[in-house]
Amino acid sequence: MSARRRRYSALAAAIILVSVIAGGVGATPAPGPESSATNGTANETANATPPHQNPEVISEAGDDQRVASHLATQLGSRLNLSAAALSEGEYAEGRLPLEAEEYAVLLERYSAVAADIDAEETADRFNLTREQQLQLTDSIEELEITGQEYQNAVDNGSDEKARQLARELLTTAEELSQTTTELNEQYEALETETEIDFNATQESISVVQQTVQRAAAGVIDREFTETNITVETNQTTVAASDPLRVSGQLTTVGGAPIRNASVSVSLGEDSITTRTTETGQFETTYRPLLASTSARNLTVAYTPTGSEPYLPVTETVAVSITEQAATSVELENTTQAAAFTEPVQATGQVMIAAEYNRSLAGIPIVLTLDQQRIATAETNSSGRITLSGSMPETIPAGDANLQVSIDRRELAIERSMATAPITVQSTPTDLSTDPTVTSTNETRNVTVGGQLRTADGDPLSDRSIRVAIGETTLGTVETNASGGYQATYELPAGLRGSDITVTATFEGTGTNLEASAAQQRVPLPSAGLGVGRVLAGVVGGGLLVMSVIVVLLASRGVDREWITQTWARVTDSTDPAADSETTTTTASSATTGLSDNGQIEAVTQASLHSAREALAAGHPNVAVQSAYAAVRSRLQSSGSLSTPQTHWEFYRQLHADHEIDTAQLAQVTEAYETATYSADGLSSDAAAETLSAVEELIGDPGTGSTR
């Protein structure tokens, strides 16, 4: 092996061993009033607690300062354990104390206590120290891997690859050095704030930094040559109309010219490049384009590629921009009209009054409509622009102006703009609603759901829907990602009649979306037991309510308004006396001579009729409630009429009756419970299945079934 190879190998070995620092020295907290962590095993250190203190008791109550001290000691122990493992080259073990859940839990608990003792900054520092130590671990591991690859390239005689890897080593070493400096600062602050001894850990970290710096110096000495650059300018001010001439020479520190090298000239974020001649000289003219008018230092730099055997070099010169160059935006094609979500586009070119002998790429451009940003782009090398966005809903329909402008004001070029007319077209919307009314012992609620879409079927999310009954607004609800909405509101007290009209409205104010509304009439159950229009007169023991109403119609001195409301809930009619010319006669004859069985059958059939009508009208919950009333009417025993029962008490009473299909009864009971008490309610299909089960259960003559 040549002497050069041996030197490379020795250097690589030194880099690989960077992580084995301080001869395996581990850092632990020094014993103190609140610390008992020692140099014992990892488990012993991790589990150590301050003497005479029960962690379970400390974590629950007592002196906040003692609690914070205990938790800080535990956090410090884990930081020290990590450093100790890192010093042995055990990267996984070094990460474990910091990445394990215990550290996060301890830090969370410490942060909670820290808020009470003005130690929030210390809590943040424990978190930052953890992150930086993990970053240090990553850098050391990366350095070791790259060092091994570097050694392999040296051994194989691959000088170009060795230089590329050496440059990577220098980059990683620079990052690692910065991390160790910041980490030591954190440990010094933690030691001051918590009185935990981090000296051993800091020593280990310092050894890492020093070892890496020595290794980096060795790589530089063996792989790269230091360089020098001289720079001259013709003036200290610059403008597009008064460009700056920049010249100089790039050489090694020994004076040898560096030929055909790329040299950059930058003012802030604005940069151009030039190349050196055979003698290492360069000359260029700089006209500022993207530089900020506040920039003050012109930077001339040589940044070698990975395989070049040179080190980078930089020189700065003080300059200032005296004026902005005049510009204009010329539009060629723009969108003439667009509706919501349709494309809005513009093409054109940025023109600069001064003569530029450089690329115009990178000028930031913005497309706005009614002062709202629609799209952004940058110019290409010739200053051409293409912008494309979509029409937002927040632009009101009508005539508007589309504007294309340079997107920054403080550049070395002036901000300019151009406008073009555009017609914002309105978009029709479609709103649906499906309200359901339910009642409890105290209140009546309406659940309103539906969907908002464009006329083409696209869902409209995050839009407000107003829900009202007549002139009374119940509230507003936002549509979800699919345009759907649902909300439940308590109905105002005092509502009368057999039904209500629920209105959902999308107003579209201030947008190009057209307003839309949907209305739905829904039967209004009575407040109380909440069983729908019929069950109010059945479940609570009022099995004969229909016949009672018929009898009362022929009487005097009764509350006919109450009779009308109750009849409406039972028969869908708002005026029992106006159904036909023979209403009173029929009512009278309906009760005269009717047996108990006849009265029960009348209520049963009325309930079934109401259920079928409600289902046909699109009210599945009301249909199931009415159908359940028919079940109660037909199956309730005469002895239980005076004893109100819940739906499940009624089910359990009949469960022993072997002539009844209790499986069907359970199905109907569950459906009734969902229709009455669940906010989601039942679907029309589920209601239809329930109605069929009811007809089979009670043997409805209308269906042809018998019992």
Image (cartoon, rainbow, N blue to C red):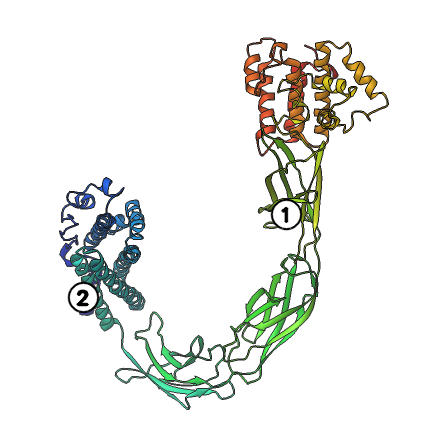
Please indicate, yes or no, whether residue 455 appears anywhere in the rendered image. no
Expressed as whole percent of the image width and height from the top left, the position of residue 16 reads: 22, 59
Expressed as whole percent of the image width and height from the top left, the position of residue 237 reads: 44, 87
Badge nearest the viewer, 1 or 2 = 1
Question: Residue 246, relative to residue 386: is it above or below?
Answer: below
Question: Residue 604, relative to residue 491: is it above or below?
Answer: above
Q: Which numbered marker is on residue 6? A: 2
- Please indicate whether residue 498 sits to the left or right of residue 661 in the image: right
Dividing the picture into quadrants, the one containing residue 22 is: bottom left
Expressed as whole percent of the image width and height from the top left, the position of residue 599 reads: 72, 13
- Residue at point 58% right, 8% down? 658
Which quadrant holds the N terminus? bottom left
Tag 2: residue type? Arg
Instruction: Tell me the element at label 2.
Output: helix
Expressed as whole percent of the image width and height from the top left, the position of residue 418 reads: 63, 74
Tag 1: residue type? Ile
Give 135 or 540, whichever is nearer the viewer. Answer: 540
Question: In this view, which residue lies farthest toward the bottom?
Answer: 234
Give 472 or 484, whichever is nearer the viewer. Answer: 472
Task: Name the N-terminal-most of marks 1 and 2.
Answer: 2
Q: Which numbered marker is on residue 465? A: 1
Count every numbered label the image shows and give the total.
2
Q: Residues within 10 Å of mark 1 (few under 14, many from 20)?
A: many
Q: Which numbered marker is on residue 631? A: none
Q: Residues within 10 Å of mark 2 (few under 14, many from 20)?
A: few
- Please indicate whether residue 67 sits to the left or right of residue 501 in the image: left
Instruction: Tell me the element at label 1.
Output: strand
Report, in whole angstroms, how far the alpha carbon at label 1 lies from the one at label 2.
79 Å
- Residue at point 24% right, 63% down? 185
